[in-house]
Amino acid sequence: MKLIVEHGRYGYTLDNLLYDDINFAVNEGEILSILGPNGVGKTTLLRCITTLLKWHSGHTIIDGVPVTGRNRTNIWEKISYVPQTSSAKFPYTILDMVLLGRCSHLKVYSMPSKKDYDIAMHALDQVGIAHLYRKKCNEISGGEYQLVLIARALAAQPQLLILDEPESHLDFRNQILVLSMLEKVVREGNLSCIINTHYPEHAMRLADNALILGRGRQYLFGKAADIISAENLSDVFGVKVKMLPFEYGGKTLSSIIPLEVI
Amino acid sequence: MKHLSSRIIIMLLSVAIIFTVVGCSSNASKESGTPAVAEKGKFPYTITDQAGRNIVIEKQYERVAMSSVRPIPAAYLAATGSINELVGINPSSMVAAKSSMLAVLAPNIVNLPTGFVEGNETNIEELMKLKPEVVFCLNTNKQEIDALEAVGIRAVGMETNGTDAIELFSQWAKLIGEVMGKENQAGAIIDHSRAVAQKVKEVAQTIPAGEKKTIMFLYTDDGKTIKVGGSNLYSQYWCETIGGINAAAEVSNVAVVNMEQIYKWNPDYIFITNFTETQPEDIYNNKYPGQDWSNLKAVKDGHVYKIPLGVYRWFTPTSDGALMLQWTAQKVYPQYFNYYNIETEIRNHYSKFYNYNLNDAELALILKPSSDAGSYKARTKE
Amino acid sequence: MDPVSHIESWEAAPKRHGIPLLTKVILVLLPLVVFVLSFGLGRYNVSPQAVWGILWGQAFNLPSSYPGTDTSVIMVLRFPRILMCLLVGAGLSMAGAALQGMFGNPLVSPQILGVSAGAGFGAALAILLSGSIFMIQTMALFFGICAVAITYAISRFKGGDSSVYMLVLAGVITSAFFEALISIIKYVADPFSKLPTITYWLLGSMANVSWQDLMMVAPIIGFGIVGLIIMRWRLNILSLDDDEARSLGININASRIMVIIFCTLITAASVSVCGIVGWVGLVIPHICRIIVGPNHKNLIPACLSVGAVYLLMIDNLARSLVSTEIPLSILTALVGAPFFAYLLSKSGGQWS
């Protein structure tokens, strides 16, 4: 599916806009990475894209159709969202939690069927924690819980997967695991993906396109390899960086080293 | 010299008494116009109220209020012969008065103020506006008694605990008589009530054990909750005095019971008080959907009655207590209590003690009262 | 790990992942057993043969050879009362569980949105005005629903979504308001007649429940119960944060309104026939979480069963233990509070 944001305009107060006339697109099978300093509105942007918040002006357009008030809930049949944090108020089992992802495909009066359970288990399998399906959500580590949330998003069989800083709470190894898993799942399923990240290296590694949000409603959008440059990073983050590209596994990866604060 | 000094002493004493009395009742005398004067030799005298307090009665009171204990205004009428001195009564007493014979016997009672009682509390300031000289109140309400005495109003505590309705009424009447200097009038109805009770007891003792009947006093039934009169309440007294057995003796005071418990007791007689709107027809016709009275012996035998309503609800201690005994006894054991005609007794009682000749309609309404007293609505005067 | 073998182990798992079969059997059978046994309990002694004979005879319209008293005890006094207990016990427990799920807070009871305070006010007002039983019940129902409508309206002040936080605050306001009104009514009521009636009514009682009462409230409570059963799986989603829940594809506002409507109807109807019965909506969901876990798909039906049994057993005590009727709230609190303390000591606040 193709998602376009056109002339997007939003701020929590009207005299303090986060974005003014922001434009970008995610095509089928593309991964878009969003970068930016704290407080610049990355999570808010995700909420605007998915209409959890309403654009003051501008549209989110999905497959050529602008998302309006009427078809807002239908959006979740195609999009899945993995939030940054989640507080589990009741200790559901992992399988029950992942099963909730099937909701957008079920009618209001129906219950999940065996087929839904199978899809949920498959999603758990995709993220590699199927053996934990009977454990309770409060009995696993933070990293494992993040995988549960991703599995839940995958269980909805989305066309677009949106993740808000999925690697933030993970250790060094788990970060790579999650990224590799995401890449595999997205490519295999031909999903589109939007991923907020604090790590430009991850963006470079994973993303086709990048959207860098700067202060004062500035933004840069384009191919990841083009947009994520030492110059842009310095401008936006106020940090002098050095980028060291190298070849690995047939791809050009980049190590991005912060030198000093500007 | 001796003659002169004794005269001076008597004069001084009289002046002292006059000054004391005038001083104490100066507020009242300003309103009534005539200064209160002590009857030489009678005042002051001391009595004991039912809170165990010694009370000094210094004058003939002319302004009397009643703040609680609902049946007291009716008792007052019987003990003193009029309600002329009343300046205010409890609102629940007013409701009762308007739906009973009290409003007929003493029509001016309906004009009395009741606003000084809010909820269960007496507003002393409001009460003071009525300028009462003496207030009959609840003997256990120490706060109210102290507050009244502090503002110079004589408080007389009245007891409500007790099972013997005749004795309790007698104590009330005696106390009221002492306070108001109407001992003789009060004494008349006290003696009569006790005499009737004594006679009824004697006849009741002749009833063989095998013929004893069980009686249940249905205190209230509003369709949702059934309350009966258990032991430790007037129900016990009425039952025992006439030679009956209180079917609800295993519960005490006013107790909430369910229908099954009443089935278990299966009383021979059911008497419905005037605290509820329920009438015998409601019981016979099973008016309340969740209740089935039809299986009970009392219902099958047609022995469900509404207690008469005279000067106050007859279930409680009243000046009609003698009539209550006579009426109930005759209902339960007509073959033993056949030496009087209840209608004649009622007429005579009202003529003698309230100085009122009942007409047929009034007599009928006493014997078969409406539901007004139980609905706590005021009845319009006939 | 080999993905295939995982899925193979899953194939066998449904039986192990769900509730054990024995638990399910007990949850289904227990209400039936207690239901049947309850017919034999009461102040008036009816032999088991008579109980059976009367029920059988009534079911098949056979001529009765049993004394009228026995028949009345079974058919007029016990039967509607037992059914009402099952209905109200189930309804209040399910409503409690649903609201705890919706608010994500296990300390929530059905009273949180003000329905009991409103219904109590309606009933007290009707009693004060010397209304009939029907008027008392209708006014209780009406004001119970009004109170929740007011709560919902308050929660939407400032044009915001009725987030759970606003709902809780609004519920506190509405409850406090109606409680104050009840206090005023108690103050002006005749202390010898109306006040005891109001007080007793507020304490809750199943006494003198009739078939008519059942016919009036069974559809309402039944509607609420069925609604909650249909919605039970979605309660899991409602218990999540707002955005998270939305992102899973449910309409939060519509879902919350539906849950509130079902719970309000159940509670208001229950209060209108039997007064305020506390502790059932609070404690039973906790007990059921320990038995079947927090997944509302299992929790809601479990509450139906356990709640029905609990209130029925409590009411059996209320009407049989001593000669007088014991108000329900007293018993549910006397039994519920220590039992709740025991649960907390065992579970340490966790439910597993």
Image (spheres, coloured by chain):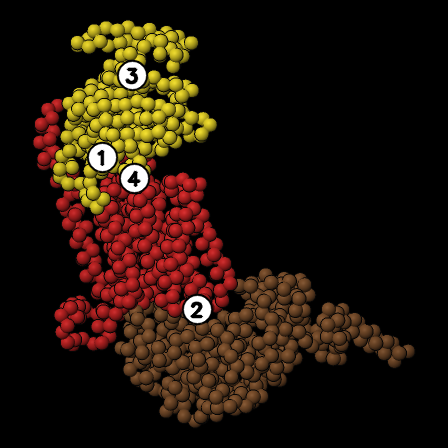
Chain colours: A yellow, B brown, C red
**Real-space CA distance between mark 3 and mark 2, rounded to the nearest whole angstrom:** 77 Å
Do discs 1 and 4 belong to a common subunit?
yes
Q: Position of residue A172 (x, y in %)?
A: 26, 16
| Mark 1 chain | A
Label 1 residue SS: helix
The kind of residue on which mark 2 rests is Ser
> Quadrant location of residue B63?
bottom right
On residue A77, which mark appears? Answer: 1
The answer to whether the residue labelled 3 contacts the one labelled 1, judged by CB atoms less than 8 Å apart, is: no
| Mark 3 chain | A
Taking the image as shown, residue B224 lies to the left or right of residue B123, namely left
The answer to whether the residue labelled 4 contacts the one labelled 3, judged by CB atoms less than 8 Å apart, is: no
Taking the image as shown, residue C61 lies to the left or right of residue B20, namely left
In front: label 1 or label 2: 1
**Real-space CA distance between mark 3 and mark 1, rounded to the nearest whole angstrom:** 27 Å
Q: Position of residue B249 (x, y in %)?
A: 37, 73
Camera sees residue B112: yes
Do discs 3 and 2 belong to a common subunit?
no
* Callout count: 4
Do discs 1 and 2 belong to a common subunit?
no
Which residue is found at the position 45% from the left and 29% from the top? A14
Dot 1 crowding, Cα within 10 Å, few <14, some 14–19, many 20+: many
Q: Which residue is mark 2?
A: C130
In front: label 1 or label 4: 4
| Mark 4 chain | A
The kind of residue on which mark 3 rests is Gly
Q: Which residue is mark 4?
A: A70
Please tell me which residue lies in front, C312 or A164.
Answer: A164
**Real-space CA distance between mark 1 and mark 2, rounded to the nearest whole angstrom:** 57 Å
The kind of residue on which mark 1 rests is Glu
